Image: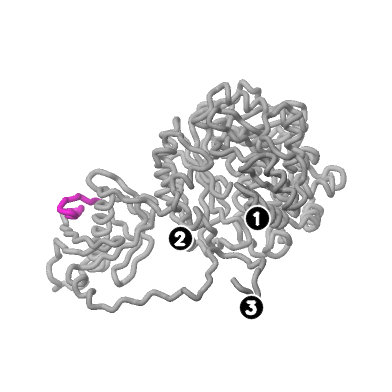
Amino acid sequence: SRWCLVTSHKLYSSVYDPNEKTFEKLLIANRGEIACRVIKTCKKMGIKTVAIHSDVDASAVHVKMADESVCIGPAPTSKSYLNMDAIMEVIRKTRAQAVSLNVSICCSFLSSLSLQESEGVTFIGPDTHAIQAMGDKIESKLLAKNAKVNTIPGFDGVVKDADEAVRIAREIGYPVMIKASAGGGGKGMRIAWDDEETREGFRFSSQEAASSFGDDRLLIEKFIDNPRHIEIQVLADKHGNALWLNERECSIQRRNQKVVEEAPSTFLDPETRRAMGEQAVALAKAVKYSSAGTVEFLVDSSKNFYFLEMNTRLQVEHPVTECITGLDLVQEMIRVAKGYPLRHKQADIPINGWAVECRVYAEDPYKSFGLPSIGKLSQYQEPLHVPSVRVDSGIQQGSDISIYYDPMISKLITYGSNRAEALKRMEEALDNYVIRGVAHNISLLREVIVHPRFVQGDISTKFLPEVYPDGFKGHKLTDLERRELLATAASLYVAEQLRSQRFLGTPRIPIAKSKRSSWELSVRLGDGIYPVAVSKDGSSFSVEVDGMKLNVTSEWNLASPLLSVTVDGTQRTIQRISRNASGETSIQFLGTVYKLQILTKVAAELSEYMPEKAAEDTSSILRSPMPGTVVAVSVKPGDMV
């Protein structure tokens, strides 16, 4: 992956001092892109790494990158990546001096066994007290209050049952947020607007919390309607020093999980930024925090901000902070764990340029803004040829996206001297990202970053449901874009017909008729059928659509997954996803995949006589909207439903 570090400021470039000794060997109790991210910095620092993996992850990228690897169990996380006994055994076996843990087991792992005392192993992260305090939302809220950090009104105790949840919700006033005390990542969270939703939310949140975190305790607090989600990155050492590394705007979310992040935020002024940063540092010092961490806030339209939670780990969205500050946060975490003091002062921390991150998921964005997809990545190509692009991923071509783990494919980050430049590069990077074999959310990500509201910075955590109240439907083509797509598809069809007439650069049959120079086609797009006339003009095509002529040029490298096409001077990067012998083809254009059928005029006329395949009758079939495991069946034969 490329690093978008600010090279003009040498103070903030990632310089690794070979004389600064840290650890000889580090075990990474994690998987995917974050494990790969840690390994990259360890390699630069001269630290050997040990990867753990489940049996289905034996060929995973993080396993191949590490110096050593150990299988610790079958696919389910409870039997592998969250198996504390197995991890401890690997630490003893490999004699690792330090360990970087999966956040889901940090608290229970450290509370059950002090690594430093029992094994002589250093944990890359804060100490036990800070993890336990901040990992418990109830305790963290009380600590935040004592540290003079703004907090959301709510009930600070543990909610015992659904009846008590309803009573508390009425006292606070609807709407309320029901949250897992030990939760994170949007799991175990429900918004309730009345008593019935509170009872239902209590049941589902407690079940999800117990399943995800092994802790079904819940708390209830006032739901701040239409807020922004802005977080502060903090960095602290064991010597009482703490810094805030500016903010990250994380308001674009679905199901309380972040989708697009950026740094800095368009919304904060210097005074609000400083106030949030100082409160974040105050909280870190209150719990004697020593590592990289994130203090999350909800910010209302008047720039009032309220403490949400503190994440005692390296956040998924940390790359945008690295881009605008030039710091390598993994390196800083390792240095702090070894006992070194921070190298920088608060006045040294810059905001250089702008960075945007899109979370690329194996999800179908047309289902609830993204329900998981599974399958094998039959083709995979990251857009690293685009300038100032960084891709943090833990997969490769041939990798399997399974039901066992998070469906994230990668984190796609672009950097620019300003926001407009970063967004333009993100648009280009998304168009040049090749992913085949699974559904993905590229279309949603691209629509978000080009939407006028997002470009203007007019966003909140309700952005997606407000902009797409009926669900995401893909890009809606303008008349000009429709003509561009039709002209491009028709030109691609003709280019392929011409290629099929040649063999090793010469005509297959010497006595064949002279080459055709014009084609009359019929192109079906959606519910419309459009007559399209194509004529070859040197290396380009002249295409007539809707009575208008368009000039289409390209190198027409039909073997490439990416095609750069210029239509009347406008450059587009398209991808042909599929095609078949009946003229049906799928083309990714402006991020969205469109299905077309391209036929000659004669074939189109004859196709009217072809019988249409009857649609499958699914009226008696119950289909799951996503892959997964059936955890409960709430009916039995004979029940009235």
Q: Residues within 10 Å of mark 1 (few under 14, many from 20)?
A: few
Which residue in the structure is indicated by mark 3?
638
Q: Which mark is residue 436?
A: 2
| Viewer-proximal residue among 483 and 106 | 483
Which residue in the structure is indicated by mark 1?
200
Residues in magenta, as a range: 538-554
Q: Nearer the viewer, mark 2 or mark 3?
A: 3
| Residue 346 appears left or right of 614 | right
- Amino acid type for the residue under numbered disc 3: Gly
Q: Residue furthest right?
A: 118
Kindly indicate the quadrant of the structure image that contains residue 97. Answer: top right
Q: Determine the secondary structure under disc 2.
A: strand
Q: Quadrant of the C terminus?
A: bottom right
Q: Residue drawn 53% across and 61% down? A: 373
| Residue 241 appears left or right of 462 | right
Q: Disc 2 and disc 3: Cα gap in Å?
A: 44 Å
Q: Earlier in the sequence, mark 2 or mark 3?
A: 2
